[in-house]
Image: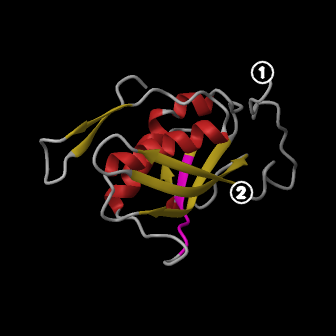
Amino acid sequence: MEIGKINLKNMEFSEEGPFIEKFIWTKSNYKLMLGKWKIGIILEAGYQLLKSVENKESCVKLTDQIYFQNMLFPYPYSQPLTNEELECFCRGLKLISNQIEKLLQKDSYLKIALRVIQFEDCNIQNEAFTASAIQWASETFKFPMPQISVYFNDSKGQNGIYLFDFSLI
């Protein structure tokens, strides 16, 4: 195991339940400032290592081993997300799921939950939720942040738009 890396493979489960009974919460601050306006997303998400996933109906299955649960606090503690915005967040987790699964035992499950997210409504694009999920996971599980190419296009939209390229992940 490398220094600074999280190794979830060596964790053992107790007979009473999951190894990590409570969520481990971490914060992340995604910033993008390339064009005329900036995008900023502050979020708090957590993970729980489980022997089995109960209440699967309240979760989104990302892979056979990774599930997502929306646990967003009500406004003003967190901003609500639309279904499309939540799908974009989950897309980010799916894109790097192979990095996360390398850390898991074969017979274990990981539940990831989002409980707080803050951003400026007028300065947001859905792709930023994808990028913020990737950044949170890379910081939390200690793997290198994958390369996301982003360009600002002045000629699109009223004030320009950011163009995200996730193809290198």
Q: Earlier in the sequence, mark 1 or mark 2?
A: 1
> For mark 2, what is the residue?
23
Q: Residue furthest front?
A: 36
Label 2: which secondary element? loop
Dot 1 crowding, Cα within 10 Å, few <14, some 14–19, many 20+: few
User: 96 and 166: which one is in front?
Assistant: 166
Residue type for callout 1: Glu
Residue beneath the point at 46% across and 47% down: 31
Residue beneath the point at 36% across and 56% down: 85
> For mark 1, what is the residue?
2
* Mark whose residue sits in front, 1 or 2: 1
State left or right for residue 54 relative to residue 51: left
Residue 89 covered by magenta stretch: no
Magenta region? 67-73
Residue type for callout 2: Phe
Label 1: which secondary element? loop
